[in-house]
Amino acid sequence: MATPATTTLQLTERELRLKNLLLDVAAFIDKTGPGETSTESSAPSEPVVLRWAGGWVRDKLLGQESHDIDTAINVMTGFTFARRMQLFCENPENTARHDMAASDLGNLHKVEANPDKSKHLETATVRIFDMDVDFVNLRKETYAADSRNPQMEFGTAEEDALRRDATVNALFYNLSTGLVEDFTGGLTDMAAKRIQTPLEPLQTFTDDPLRVLRLVRFASRLQFTINPAVEAVMADPRVLDALRLKISRERVGIEVEKMLKGKHPRDALALIDRLGLYHAIFTDPGAEANTPLPSLAGWASTYQCLHVLAETKTPGSLYDILVRTEEAQYFAWVLAAIVPWAQVAPPPPPPPPPAPAKGKGKGNAGNVPSKPPPAPVVLALREGIRAPNKLCDVVAGAYKHRDEILDLKLAVLDKKEPDIHERDRFGMAIRSWEARGSNWRLQVLFALLFEVMALAQTAAPESPSPTQVESLLRDWQTFLDHLEALDVMDAPHIKRLLDGKQVAAALGIKPGKWMTAAMDMCMAWQLRNPEETDPAGAIEEVRQRKDEVGITDLLK
């Protein structure tokens, strides 16, 4: 094994307690062996050496606290070590020596070996001293040409370091020596704030193309730059082909979610944009080869605009009004990521199936038109990153209602009297957006971001001027201020004065399909008469407009 570069770390009191406990367990195993239940030999072939690995070491060197520690073991699986640790802690003398309460050692969770999911050797997770500690053996990997699932076996610390995605994630802290061990140049790269691969970049990425996305995530999270030689390979056609062939879209989605939930989502999208990764991420891999792809012209202005809105949030500002929860923050960044797809029109709906021949089939079921496929923007999200249904529903609603939202905004800006003072018009629109897509505020944000992108495309090849963007954002602020003045921001949550059965009873007719229109009419009446508590006026309006509701023949 090569001699690594080294440095030191200052441990916290809790980390020092964990270190001393694990070293005692290692000495216990050296003396007694791994145990009868182990698949290893009765005694380790060499002394047990423990190393804390990867992200914890990196974050510690950066001065960031981390309560998740990966412990790498040289001569046995993580589960075997953890089982011996449990046995060690069953001795009261041992726990007393380490001042351990019963709650200081949690339950052992075993992760079984599963070659189909790249889990070739069993690992274990235990909560110790309020820290989540994973135990895993040092390993080396060999990749097949058509799979990201490696053949894995026990390895040295150097071999384990070389299999990792970046040198800054390939550092070890040796518990026995108290030194950080660097086999790949990670300490130099840490000092330079640089992302570099331990092996030649093309090999690293073709072995596991998911590393492309992981490097984007770490570069944005740590605010490091990616080595230009590494960047040059990240969008290599061979790498992108491997990304499409070997990586499940669920794994792609997990990496994207981590990027956009991090502290620097704008920087992650900017890297995806600059490196040409967009169409390998946000795309339906099952789409036909001739499916049109969106232009990314103007996209940079979109994610930059959202960044500025988030950074300048104040009470009553656009971001404060439209993005109201932690979940909405993540959804907002997904909207910024997917907005280029809103330019791509859906394909024409398929023709209805032919009517059955005379005397065959049931009625005219054959004339029922087929359900149109989801819009391309939804497919890119659902199939590209396996977004959850809730998020897909927001995007579907945003795409469907964008023109209506823009029309209402234009009406407010044009001051079309008396239309803009019709509280029911705006309130019912908001209720409709919420009911057919959920989270109407994010749907408005999507329309805003789409306009920013369109403005940038108009200004191309130059970026839109700050004055142009500020003017557009002022227009949206005027629109939202108008909704606030009408007191319709919470229109979807207004409690009805009447339910459907009460309306039917008041009219003296049986419930039926007519009720949807009647209930909308009653709610519009409520919006026009916010102080009223007696619903008689709503019932009377339904009677007066019976033709519109379709109950003329039903009323006595």
Image (cartoon, grey):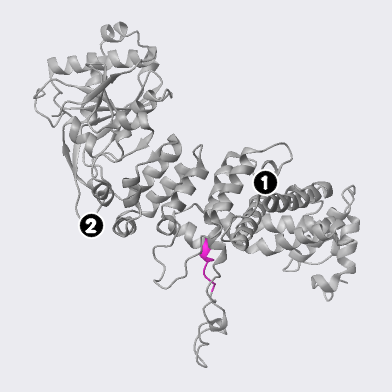
Residue 180 on image: x %, y %: 27, 22
Q: Position of residue 60 (x, y in %)?
A: 38, 23
Report if the CB atoms under discs 1 and 2 are less than 8 Å apart: no
Residue 146, label in figure = 2
Amino acid type at circle 2 is Asp
Q: Identify the residue at horizontal 33%, vertical 55% (top origin).
A: 243
Magenta span dominant secondary structure: loop
Image quarter for residue 315?
top right
For the residue pair 336 and 428, the one nearer the viewer reads as 336
- For the residue marked with disc 1, what is the amino acid? Leu
- Residue at image point 48% right, 48% down: 270
- Which quarter of the image is occupied by the N terminus? top left
How packed mark 2 is, by other alpha carbons closer than 10 Å (few <14, some 14-19, many 20 or more), is few
Secondary element type, mark 1: helix
> Residue 13 in the image: x percent, y percent?
38, 12
Residue displayed at 26% across by 50% down: 202
Residue indicated by mark 1: 322
Q: Is residue 64 left or right of residue 184?
A: right
